[in-house]
Each structure stands twice: as C-alpha cells, then as structure tokens.
Amino acid sequence: MAGQTKATSDLLLETVLSSLDDDKAEDIVQIDLRGKTEIGDHMVICTGRSTRQVAAISEKLAQRIKDEFGHAVRTEGKESGDWVLIDTGDVIVHVFRPEVREFYQLEKMWLPQADAPAS
C-alpha cells in the first residue's frame, strides 16, 4: 500500500473535485449528505459535454481513486455515456450529459431550495 492514502470522506471528496476539475467537468455541484442519508457523506453532480467526455471523466476518476486510495469504485452506466454513477463509498458522483441532467434534476431532490443553483 505504499504511496496510498487512507480514505476519509473529506479526502475522497477533495480528490473527486480535483479530478473533475482536471478533466473539465462542468457545473460541478457538491452536496453534503451527512445527517440526511446513510448512502454516503457527499454527493457530487457534474456535466460532461458529450458521451465520450462523460465516459472519460468517469474512467479517469475511478483510476485516480484506485491509484490514490487503493480501492476500486463501483460504476453504473458507463456503457451508454449518458449518466454515469460512481460510488467511492463515502462520495457518490453523478456525471451527466447536459440533457440527461436537466431531465432528472437530482439537485432539486437533495438541495434545499435556497442552495439550488439557478437554472
């Protein structure tokens, strides 16, 4: 485990946000889930401009988590490239194409209305 860091939810979140930024993900929204649900401590929602970018963002994020923390993540939806769910354990990441993100509007389910980004 040389060179790997112990995964805490805050370190995972920092790594996720850094990876998404590096890969030019757009409209990144971070939601604190602590005290709201047991599925994780944080949720991150972002957009890729195309199916190819959505797939690339998710693949690079999964590899970065594996390299830095030594554990594989669970992913769903990578084949279609419309919406990829990446479960790192404590941080749940949704990478959408713009139209799919608009359709599902996950932010509205998880964010208080005062915190929701303007559409």
Image: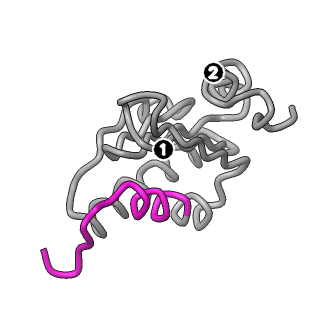
- Give coordinates of residue 55: x percent, y percent: 49, 44
Local secondary structure at mark 2 = helix
Q: Residue furthest bottom?
A: 3
Q: Position of residue 22 (x, y in %)?
A: 59, 67
Quadrant in which the N terminus appears: bottom left
Disc 1 residue type (three-letter) = His
Q: Quadrant of the C terminus?
A: top right
CB atoms of marks 1 and 2 within 8 Å = no
Which region shows up in magenta?
A: 1-17
Instruction: State the residue in front, 25 or 52.
Output: 25
Which of 84 and 8 lies nearest the eye of the viewer?
A: 8
Number of the label disc, if any, that sits on residue 42: 1
Is residue 6 found inside the magenta-colored segment of the image? yes
Residue 78 falls in image quadrant: top left
Task: Establish if 115 lies above or below 68.
Answer: above
Q: Left or right: 71 with respect to 116?
A: left
Q: In the shown orientation, is residue 50 left or right of residue 8?
A: right
Tell me: 98 left or right of 44: right
Q: Position of residue 111 (x, y in %)?
A: 66, 31
- Identified by mark 2, the residue type is Met
Q: Is residue 110 magenta?
A: no
Q: CA distance from mark 1 to mark 2?
A: 14 Å
